[in-house]
Amino acid sequence: MKNVAKLLVERRRWIFAFVLAATVICGLLIPRVGLTADMSGYLPDDSKMKIGTDLMNEEFPDSADYTIRVMFQGLSDEEKAAMAGRLAAIAGVTNVDYRADDPDCNKDDYAKFVLHTKFAYNTDGEKAIESTLASEFAEHGMQFANDDTAGSGMPAWVALGAAAILTLILIVMCNSWIEPFLFLFTIGIAVVINLGTNLILGTVSETTFSVAAILQLVLSMDYSIILTNRYRQELSKTSDREAAMKEAVAGAFSSISSSSVTTVVGLLALVFMSFKLGVEMGVVLAKGVFLSVVCVFLVLPGLILWTSGLLEKTRKPTPKIPTGGLAGFCNRFRIPLTVVFAVLFVAAFILHNRTTVSYSMIINDPVAEVFPKESTVVLLYENGDDEKITKLAEEMVTWNGVKSATNFSNTLGKQYTAEEMAAVLAGMTEGFDASYVGMLYQFRAASMPQAKSDTMSLVELMSFLRELLAADASIRAMVGGETAAFIEQSAAEMQDAVRQMQGPEYSRLVITLRLPEEGEEINAFFERVNGECKDLAGEYYLIGSPAMNYEMSQSFDGELALITILTAVAIFLVVLITFRSPVVPVILVLLVQCGVYITVTAIGFQGYSINYLALLIVQCILMGSMIDYGILFSNYYQEARKACGTAEALKRAYAGSVHTILTSGLIIVIVTAVFGQCFGDPTIEQICRTIAIGAAFAIVLILFLLPGVLACLDRLTAGRNRLKKQKQ
């Protein structure tokens, strides 16, 4: 390693130039990395919803329909009718849903209008509609929300704010006023390279893009601190700064590499998720931590040497943290503290299962606070099962929470007698009385003997009438221009609607639900649907956000258990290499896992559910990153036990590690907590809040329980070379 350190220091100018060039290139590549908000694309390849979604896109390529819900307060009945017309006139709006007699559109003093558009969410067209709403409809307390299930992107000011908080913490804790800026510059380069190299993935989710940079920043900052502290130690032995840096790079390599390996291993555990968003996030974050380590060795040595004079001139005092009393307390009460740890672990393990896991993205939705949001599920089925599905749809509307269930056969394809058809047409236009409709039925039966004579669907009637108008100009003249236009328009619209309901091989049953998108009620609905559909001749697929949540909930517990075990085993093996004894690795793994259980339990006690991504990320980050603090403390303890007893060893361990633990720990806790609150995206906020809570618990466990456990199990933890003859 000394030869590598020599090369890094002596060739620092060329290396720095190369890294800067790579940073510029990667910075230019960042805008080319595609961002996606479609979570269904991250489902495993064997997912029924993913297969069904792909089939539906093939069968119904033009079926996309995007909606924006708009709410007004205090409109009169006349104003509501006029407002529906104004909203329909917005460029890009295909139609507006509003019914004066529908309680789902009118509640107390509020009115809800649903705008439909072909523009996908977050495209220029959809944003233009929202801009028009904000600028031209800012009246009667107007509020709107689209039905996009994805979170928002990261505003630049939030990233700058997070960096400012991190800088403030470093300024307080570092030995020089300019050290924080060297650290930020170094890790900032790694962040840019990481974001640019995401191009190899093609696209990344907006969630990954939003949290990756900040998490990389807070997880990697301690590597810079370790190298700088080692440089100061070496500089105290020699006045040759280059020689001191060579020794620092060689000496810090073991500490930084072992620390980063646990973090990378913890993050890579996410790749074992079947839901590919976890795979993506694990790869991006692990890649970011690795690049941060590389940049610390390639960039930071040169920066320190070039600014060494300024570093000396800007030296400042750092906070002195008295830990002598705490060390004495932990040594004196080491047995009770060990018992507390054991009881706490068992209790947290039992209680954490009471916290429910959520799978849907949380979104601020002011309209849903007045008009509870309805959810849509599509049942895609083979055309041969149409009769059975139509009967199921008729029964389904009687189920609790089902507002409607529509397919071709129970809407446009529904068969009507002449009298029934006359009643239907009476609500659509004038001129189609019962006798006239009866005559049309008789005429069609005479001209099309192969067709049904006593019943007809709306589509069949309008298609028949359009053919008559096209074949005989005298008939067109007889029915009149207005009726002819109605027939032409209705026939065209119905044919388009049919194409959205019935494809070459599959048909769609569109189910509108008044149920939460996840939880026991919606799960019971899907289980009932699956039970009713098990006897279908062909395959069927349930599609939609609630269906995706249900599918994920069926496999998540098993995957979480697998990831927990794999992470614990992998981290145990890594730590085992460091300590060459299984006892300390077991203690550290159990301690950090206890922090995970306490975090989940605490969130449940507050009455919240925990987002599955937040749970997975906090699991991997705590196990991969927070365990480094335990390794650091344990290393100091073992080293001190070679020369002194347990009480003094605990004092030295605290003195050697507490500053690094608190500096790095405060960065993770404070930055993620504040960043999440400022972001404005509830899902990202919960992920960051969970990381902050988990990191805080892990730090408390390491500083207040780990010392007592190490002292209590001293014969097993102090190492072979301890001075056994020393007494307490």
Image (cartoon, helix red, strand yellow):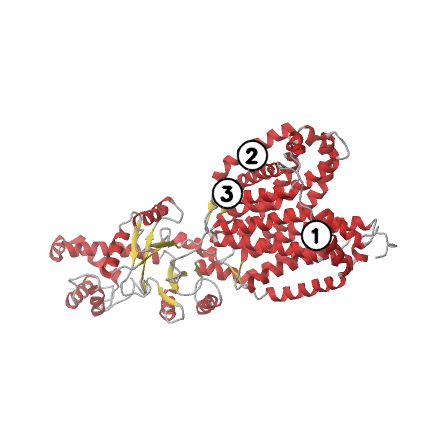
Residue at the location (80% across, 49% down)? 640
* Between marks 3 and 2 in the image, the one whose residue lies nearer the viewer: 2
Query: Please, what secondary structure does the residue beneath circle 1 have?
Result: helix
Residue under circle 3?
A: 202
Circles 3 and 2, Cβ within 8 Å, touching? The answer is no
Residue at the location (32% across, 47% down)? 135
**Above or below — where is 416 with respect to 706?**
below
Earlier along the polypeptide chain: callout 3 or callout 2? 2
Residue under circle 2?
A: 23
- Between 89 and 365, the residue placed more toward the observer is 365
Within 10 Å of disc 2 (Cα), the crowding (few <14, some 14-19, many 20+) is many
Residue under circle 1?
A: 630
Residue 588: horizontal and vertical position, in percent? Answer: 70, 55
Q: Which amino acid does label 1 sit on?
A: Gly
Rounded to the nearest whole Å, what is the CA distance between mark 3 and mark 2?
19 Å
Query: Please, what secondary structure does the residue beneath circle 3 have?
Result: loop
Earlier along the polypeptide chain: callout 1 or callout 2? 2
Looking at the image, residue 503 sits to the left or right of residue 20; the answer is left
